[in-house]
Amino acid sequence: MFGDLMGMMGKLQETQQKIEETKKRLDSVLVDEQSNDGLLKVTLTANRAVKSISIDDSLLEDKEQLEDYLILILNKAIAKATAVNDAELGAVAKEGMPNIPGMGNLGF
């Protein structure tokens, strides 16, 4: 029993290390989003850190329009980055889950 427990603990530690490595790697995965007219472009990492924002000069003339564009496009980019992040981390976590008797059908 203790051997199984120690094995599971080792597997969990290994999985935690893989998750941390994946989080670091996701800092280099870039997600781009832009408005339909191409006037505003943003780039985020898969960890949802803003890397760049490109604003066409025409948007600088209308503060309210620029604010609306920023909200819309940033939210779309964050949703995309979150999807990538969740998929990558979920795959690592699922792969590393120990086989615990009676917990095989949890939907992972």
Image (cartoon, grey):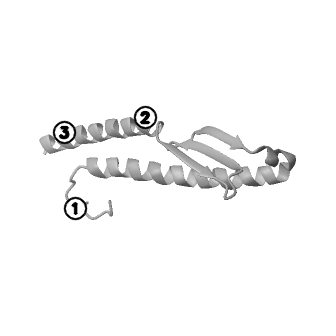
Q: Gap between marks 1 and 2, in whole Å?
A: 33 Å
Name the element at disc 3: helix
Q: Badge 2, how many Cα within 10 Å: few under 14, some, many 20+?
A: few
Q: For the point 60% across and 51% down, which residue is it?
A: 33
Q: Position of residue 102 (x, y in %)?
A: 22, 61
User: Nearest the camera: 58 or 2?
Assistant: 58
User: Nearest the camera: 38 or 3?
Assistant: 38
Q: Position of residue 12 (x, y in %)?
A: 28, 41
Q: Badge 1, how many Cα within 10 Å: few under 14, some, many 20+?
A: few
Q: Gap between marks 1 and 3, in whole Å?
A: 18 Å
The residue that disc 3 covers is 6
The amino acid marked with disc number 1 is: Gly
Q: Badge 3, how many Cα within 10 Å: few under 14, some, many 20+?
A: few
CB within 8 Å, label 1 to label 3: no
Q: Gap between marks 3 and 2, in whole Å?
A: 27 Å
The amino acid marked with disc number 2 is: Lys
User: Nearest the camera: 90 or 65?
Assistant: 65
Pick whichever of labels 3 and 2 is earlier in the sequence: 3
- Of discs 3 and 2, which sits in the foreground? 2
Pick whichever of labels 1 and 3 is earlier in the sequence: 3
Find residue 24 and name its label.
Answer: 2
Name the element at disc 1: loop
The residue that disc 1 covers is 102
